[in-house]
Image (tube, rainbow, N blue to C red):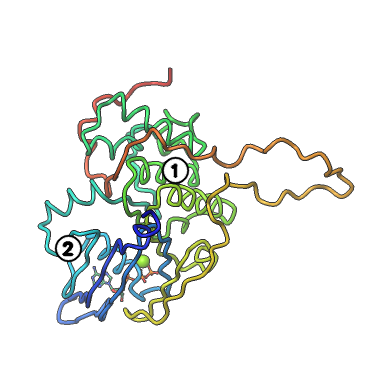
Amino acid sequence: MEQESAQKPMICVKHLRKVYRVGDEKVVALGDINLEILRGQIVCIVGTSGSGKSTLLNQLAGLEKPTKGSVKIGKVNISRLSENQLAHFRQQRLGFVFQSYNLMPTMTALENVALPLVFKGVSKGTREKAALKMLAAVGLKKRAYHKPTQMSGGQQQRVGIARAFVAKPQVIFADEPTGNLDTKTTIEIMKMMVRFARKYKQTLIIVTHDPEIADYADRVITLIDGAITSDQTHKPIYDGTEPAKQEPLVLPPGTDQSPAPPALPGPAEQPDTDTILPEQAPPIPPEKPSDLSDKGEKSP
Ligand SMILES: Nc1ncnc2c1ncn2[C@@H]1O[C@H](COP(=O)(O)OP(=O)(O)OP(=O)(O)O)[C@@H](O)[C@H]1O
Ligand SMILES: [Mg+2]
């Protein structure tokens, strides 16, 4: 049963074409894309700059209308939805992680993470609890009352991930999520996303130009000039079942390595999103603070 549902297509793309018009000029960003992505699959979309990666991601996530063709997520043909229906669909079913984090600058980490739950009508107490738990899962419990400017890039992206996953969306889209981060932080962030996605069999679609990121995916789709030129499945280097390991510990020569030390505190605590919400999803680039009138609270 579980096996079967894991094999169900989560996203189905047919004859997708996207043409931009700039003055008299036409830019064919995507030619004729046909694609099926399974539930729980971790997919990387790679390609050089201008190859159409972001355009494809935006199409898959219903952020832009196709020129031709269709995108189905689950049973919903999102290409047929109105702008309002699409916005609602994204809020309820999808999660997003951005290269530049896109956190609300006036809100604390906690409020940022809780935001998707506001859109889902979750009560204040429940969403704060869920957001705190998610922040703990990304190792940022102590930063709950910090604002984005009071955090490093890596920390901000961890808040971004907590926000993207807090409401358990079916699909999470990430466009160059580690583009602004150093190598060590990139590994932490990738492991975190993989761990969360595996736990709830969520589909994760990552756009990147970094081949090392692709190592974390089940499947790597390569685009050249708006066409898929390669689509390969492979065994990812990290299966997400264990807590994120520390990077190999380089000990000074002669250090006794025998007694295994107690598990080092990983970059993040083991994700434990069980009491978060059943189903679904966070918002897209936050438009306005919405009804978060509970902000401004200070750390207890
Ligand atoms: N809003 C737009 N208007 C006109 N042309 C666009 C628009 N968005 C993208 N394009 C064009 O479509 C093509 C694909 O762009 P896209 O942003 O998808 O590339 P990308 O693979 O994400 O590149 P990068 O790695 O630099 O982010 C490019 O030629 C780009 O100039
Ligand atoms: Mg791009």
Confirm if mark 2 falls within 8 A of ligand 1: no
Q: In the figure, 272 relative to 74: above or below?
A: above
Q: Position of residue 78 (x, y in %)?
A: 18, 61
Q: Position of residue 270 (x, y in %)?
A: 53, 39
Q: Dot 1: within a 10 Å radius of its alpha carbon, few (fewer than 14), some, or many (20 or more) residues?
A: many
Mark 2 belongs to which amino acid? Asn
Confirm if mark 1 falls within 8 A of ligand 2: no
Please state which of the two labelled residues, at mark 1 or mark 2, is closer to the viewer.
2
Residue at horizontal 86%, vertical 43%? 256
Of residues 300 and 6, the one drawn nearer to the viewer in this rendering: 6
Marks 1 & 2, CB-CB < 8 Å contact: no
Residue at horizontal 23%, vertical 47%? 91
Between discs 1 and 2, the one toward the N terminus: 2
Name the side, left or right, on which 251 lies relative to 180: right
Mark 1 belongs to which amino acid? Gln
Instruction: Please tell me the numbered disc located at residue 28.
Output: none
Which image quarter holds the C terminus?
top left
What residue did someone put label 2 on? Answer: 77
Which image quarter holds the N terminus?
bottom left
Q: Position of residue 162 (x, y in %)?
A: 41, 42
What kind of element bears circle 1? Answer: helix
What residue did someone put label 1 on? Answer: 156
What kind of element bears circle 2? Answer: strand
Distance from label 1 to label 2 (Cα)?
Answer: 33 Å
Of residues 224 and 230, the one drawn nearer to the viewer in this rendering: 230
Residue at horizontal 22%, vertical 38%? 120
Q: In the figure, 8 relative to 23: above or below?
A: above
Q: Dot 2: within a 10 Å radius of its alpha carbon, few (fewer than 14), some, or many (20 or more) residues?
A: some
